[in-house]
Amino acid sequence: MIVGTAVCPHPPLLLRELTGGQDVAAPLRQACHGALAELTATDPDLLIAVGGGDSTGEHTDAPVPARAYGGDGPRVAQADALPLSLAAARRLLDETGNELPVELHTVAHDADAGEVAGLAARLAGRGVRVGLLVMGDGSARRGVKAPGHLDERSFAFDDTVHRALAEGDTTALAGLDTALAEELMAAGRAAWQVMAAAVELEGAPVRAGVRYADDPFGVQYLVGVWTCESS
């Protein structure tokens, strides 16, 4: 059974060695640590991290080398490193002293409803208490200096996600437009939908809240926590 979920973004700057002396991502990282603390307080037996990737699949633990994500350090082939979403998840878990078993899953960035539902079905209905760590960024087109430049549609899209996370609204997340999410460079769309589908399958009501919402680099970052009432 799923006892709770924590939603975090996955910018490379979550890796402390990429932030420089000022550590501009410190407030975001702190919020993510807090969300993980709330997730572990639901007393899960297993943590499952889900993030976007080139394809859907389960991953074994692999290095989280800064150079693979744009920093310095030993050369590691990208193929030998975790996808960025899972690398950020792995780092957050390490930083918070996690000692629970962990599964790592990617969902394809362009996953359709069937692919989302298939992964959700594999995550739900376990015979142990499961905590989901869901990694995903909002739109990357929220300003003229944003990675995708400005697209005014990004604000309404991100507001929908924000409200859904704040209210535990699985239907709103399931209804996100795949094509629009791609145009807005919203990397979290598929992972959020996997979470929504998995929670919906289990049928437990949730207490929900958003712990962080900002777009410091023109990319929407949201941190939220859902606690399943049956837990």
Image (spheres, helix red, strand yellow):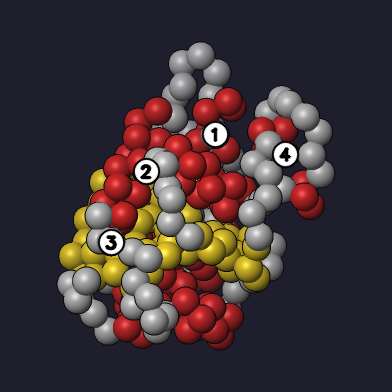
Q: Whole-percent x and y of residue 62?
A: 68, 50
Say whether marks 3 and 1 touch (CB < 8 Å). Answer: no
Mark 2 surroundings: few (<14), some (14-19) or many (≥20) residues within 10 A? many
Going from N to C along the chain, the mark reached first, 4 or 2, is: 2
Going from N to C along the chain, the mark reached first, 3 or 1, is: 1
Q: CA distance from mark 2 to mark 1?
A: 12 Å
Location of the C terminus by quadrant is bottom left
Residue ranking furthest to the top: 21
Q: Secondary structure at mark 2?
A: helix
Please state which amino acid type lies under the numbered disc 4: Ala
Mark 3 surroundings: few (<14), some (14-19) or many (≥20) residues within 10 A? some
Front residue of this view, candidates 78 and 139: 78
Location of the N terminus by quadrant is bottom left
Q: CA distance from mark 2 to mark 3?
A: 18 Å
Picture mark count: 4
Residue carrying label 3: 43
Residue carrying label 1: 15
User: Which image quarter: residue 114?
Assistant: bottom right
Q: Is residue 88 left or right of residue 124?
A: right
Going from N to C along the chain, the mark reached first, 1 or 4, is: 1
Front residue of this view, candidates 92 and 154: 92
Q: Residue at x 57, y 53 (%)?
A: 86
Q: Residue at x 49, y 42 (%)?
A: 94
Q: Please identify, in this view, whether the residue under mark 4 or under mark 3 is nearer the observer.
A: 3
Q: Which mark is residue 68?
A: 4
Q: Whole-percent x and y of residue 76?
A: 79, 39
Going from N to C along the chain, the mark reached first, 4 or 3, is: 3
